[in-house]
Each structure stands twice: as structure tokens, then as C-alpha cells.
Image (cartoon, grey):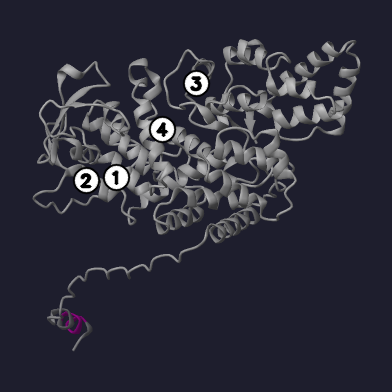
Amino acid sequence: MTAAIALLWFACIPWPVPVPQAPPAPAPQAPPALLTPGETAARIDQLFQTHWDAVEVQPAAPATDEEFVRRIYLDLAGRIPSVSEVRQFLNDSNPDRRLKLVEELLDGPAFVRHFTILWRNTLIPEALDDIRTRQLTPGFEAWLWTQLSAGTPWDKVVRDIITTPLNPAAVPNQPLTTANSPSAFFLLRDFKPEELASGTSRAFLGVRLDCAQCHDHPFDRWKQHQFWSLAAFYSGLQQSEMAADAPMMTFTTEDSSRRSIVIPRTGETVPATFLSGEQPDWQPNDFPRQVLANWITSPSNPWFSRMAANQVWSLFMGQGIVHPIDDFSESNPPSHPAVLQLLAEQFAAHNFDLRFLVRTITATRVYQLSSRKSHASQTEPEDFSRAALRGLTPEQVFDSLAEATGFYQPYRSDNPFAIADSTPRGRFLELFRDSAESPLRKETTILQALAMINGDFVTSATSPENSSTLRSIVDFPLMSDEDRLEAIFLAALSRRPSDDEIQKCLELLKSAPTSDASANTLGDIFWALLNSSEFLLNH
């Protein structure tokens, strides 16, 4: 048999055709081992040390106790500490004093109030942009305050927002009020499915779907039909025309049987579908918003736990591991994926406890680094090799001024969520409101600078006649000039003055011809400290 004939004979044999096999199903993943906040923090520090070694970055020195106490009060209480609180912490010899202070602050009302404001800014960021919608915030904040006070798990908070009853009495034309309710999430978006889809994906999943509303996303994988398939979960909502200009009282109806939506312009009808591409296994009595909420808050949903972990990380570090925080996309990968994954897994394993994230992040060496640059390699913010210099929120600025000067404390004895634009606090917050997405990029306006330099509130609060802090320091007979200077520095900057600062300030005091002039000089020093960048930044 020639070679050609043999080859032809071999080719004609009816060999069995292989049948394509489905790829093997992935082995079920075991749930992650439950770690304590300290254990999780230690693993995060190991991951960062590995990163720093790989990129030849030398991290900053640990923060001093003075740096830490100011930072942790701003981050957990929304204000600087009082002089007595600083002294108490600095005199504490307990090696675990930092962990103990975190626990004390987590148990206090100031933490709940501060985090209520921070999460309000995340969930309804547009609320303060317009006078008409500003009146919606007190009811939302009061509701959120209740949830955070009770330690409600974050997944339940989100489920309650998405599924909140919009006509509680189930009576046609029942007016919807906003008292102690998360309904502002819907009212601010005019019950429009497309606005709710965008707000939901950004706030709870960290996904910017906005660009896919009118066309396929030009820089990411999201398609137009995916945007409208998410919006379809809200397609049953309808708002009455009569309520268009009345945000505090509106009339809404909801058809829970609607599970699809028509894309404008194209006329295509798309069914309600999760962003993962899965369609719900609908049951006859399923409520679309409840089905969506269950999918969003599922422990198996990677976006939900990662978004929350990234959001809390950014609150303490100045920017997220994914930055901007609501831009999880293929073109914007996390700077430290293993850290984010660890935080997200443990957050879910701890039943979405926000305080777990706080305890973990504040216990890391990364959080407790100094902000002082000590090496040329500490340049890139993404390395987290030193504490970032963060601009304060308007609430932090005013409440810290109030604490330092002894002004009436609204966060201790007043309703923190009442609309009172005519009060010193209300006017101050309005003036210092800004639209900066990152605390690393806050810029002071001319009007804000003038308000700090010679505004009525700061001028009055730093005069010996009107400042209870200054008055008590000046009038106390047993204080030396050095003691008075130390008290002023502790009140304004939460630290003791350096030897050089003491020397220069003593020279100013000695040049004052009378006791009244000396008191005014102390007021001038106090004013200078409150106008310094050291006071106006979290560092």
C-alpha cells in the first residue's frame, strides 16, 4: 500500500466525533474564616507591607498620640476633642488606649450623628442643592439616625430604603409624607425609573450606569439595555401630576405586576434583569423592588459588599481603594484588590456590620501613620504610605470651632437635623457647602476665607469677652502664661505647643502693656491657630 493510499484509507475510517463537554462547575467556595477586627487589620497591614516592599516605598512614621486623638475624634465624632478629652487620652498609660477610645466613640451619639450626615451625602447627594428639596433631608436623616443608633446591619438598611412603602395606607391618592422615612430617596428622583436605576447602582453597587441610559457606555461594558433592565424594577411607580411641585406631600401609585419597561426612542421592551445578566425567577406575588433589594444585598453579590467597604475606607483614608468610590469598572481597577476583597468578605461574614469596618480600618497601621512626609517615596496617594491631608466637611469645621471656642454645642443639646438656616450654624454650613467629590481636593473660596478671618462668628468666638474658652483661661488665677498657651493650643490643635512656639508667643504676651492687652493678645494667638491649615485639615 502506497503512502497516499494508506493516508486516504486512514482518513475514511469513521472515527467517533468528540462531543463538546460543558466546563466543569466551579468547586463550591467555603465561606471565609471569621476574623476579628484586629486580625483583619493585621492582614491588611501585611498586604500593604508587601506592596510597599515591591514598589520600594518607605511608609511614614506612626502617628503620635496627639495626632491620633484629633484624627479619631474628627473621623468618629465629627469634631475635634475638647481640652479635657485630649488630656485624658494623653495621660492614659493603657497600651490599648487607642482601641479603647474607638470603642468609647462608637458608643456615643456623636458617632451616629456624624455617620448619619456622611451617609446622607452618599445616598441623597443632591438633597441640599435646591431649597425646594432641602426640606426632604430631616425626615431621611431622622430615619437613618434611628437605623445607625440601633446598629441595624447595612444590608437591612439598604433593603428598607429600596422597598420603603410609598403609599403606606394602600388607599388611592394617599399622600406620602417624609417624616422619619427613607422616601426622600424616591422623592428626590421624582419616582422616575431611570433616575432610580442610576441612583441605586451608584449608591449601593458603585457602578456608574448613567452613560448607558441613552447609548451603550463608551468606556465600559455596560449596554443601554442593561441600564433599562435595571430601571424596569421601578417601572410600576407613578407619581400624580398634582404633586410635581410639592416634595413634602405627593401622591403615588405602584403597579407591582409591571416587570418590564420600554426604552425611549428605540421602542424596545426589556424585562427587569439584574446587572449580572440573570433574570429573576419570578413568583406570582413577587414585588419587583423586593426582588431587586434581595439581589443587591445578597452576600454573594460582589458589588454590594465591596462598595460599602470601599466607601468606609474612603471616609477614613481620604480616597477609596477604588477611586472615585462609585466607579467600579474594568477601566478603573482597585489599587489594592486583595485588601478590598478581604474587607468585603469579612464585612459580609460579620453580617454587614458597619462598626466592624470602622473598628478594622482604624486599627490598621495604615490608618495610624503620620501625615508628615518623611521620605521622597511617600508621594502617590494610592500607596497609602502616609495619612492624607483631608479637608473638613462644613459640619466638622463649625462643630470643631464650637468645641474649641466654647460656643453653644448643637451636637450635644440641639436637634442636629432641624432646618435652621438663620442660626450661626445654618449660615456657616451654607457658606462652606461645596461640591468637591474628594476631601483631598477641597478648595477654600474667598468668602469662606473672609468668614474665617473676620466673620462675625469667628471674631466673636475668639474675643475674651465672648469666648468661654478664652475667658476661663484668662480669668483663672493659678495659670502661668505657659499654662495658658498650652491650653489654647490644646483647644485649637489638640496638641501642646513646641518650645519654639512657646518662646514666640511669650514674647508677644510680654510686649502687652496691660492685662487687658495681654488678654487680647491671647485672643489674637487663638484666632491665628483657628485660621491655620493645621486646624482646617484632618491630618
Q: Which residues are magenta?
A: 4-8
Residue denoted by label 4: 120
Q: Which amino acid, mark 2?
A: Gln
Q: Earlier in the sequence, mark 3 or mark 4?
A: 4
Q: Indicate the quadrant containing the C terminus: top left, top right, bottom left or bottom right.
A: top right
Q: Residue 322: x and y, percent?
A: 47, 43
Distance from Cα at disc 1 to Cα at disc 4: 16 Å
Q: Secondary structure at mark 4?
A: helix
Dots 2, 3 in contact, CB < 8 A = no
Residue denoted by label 1: 159
Q: Earlier in the sequence, mark 2 or mark 1?
A: 1
Q: Residue 187: x and y, percent?
A: 27, 27
Dots 2, 1 in contact, CB < 8 A = yes
Q: Nearer the viewer, mark 3 or mark 4?
A: 4
Distance from Cα at disc 3 to Cα at disc 4: 14 Å
Q: Residue 512: x and y, percent?
A: 88, 13
Distance from Cα at disc 2 to Cα at disc 4: 22 Å
Q: Earlier in the sequence, mark 1 or mark 4?
A: 4
Q: Which amino acid, mark 3?
A: Arg
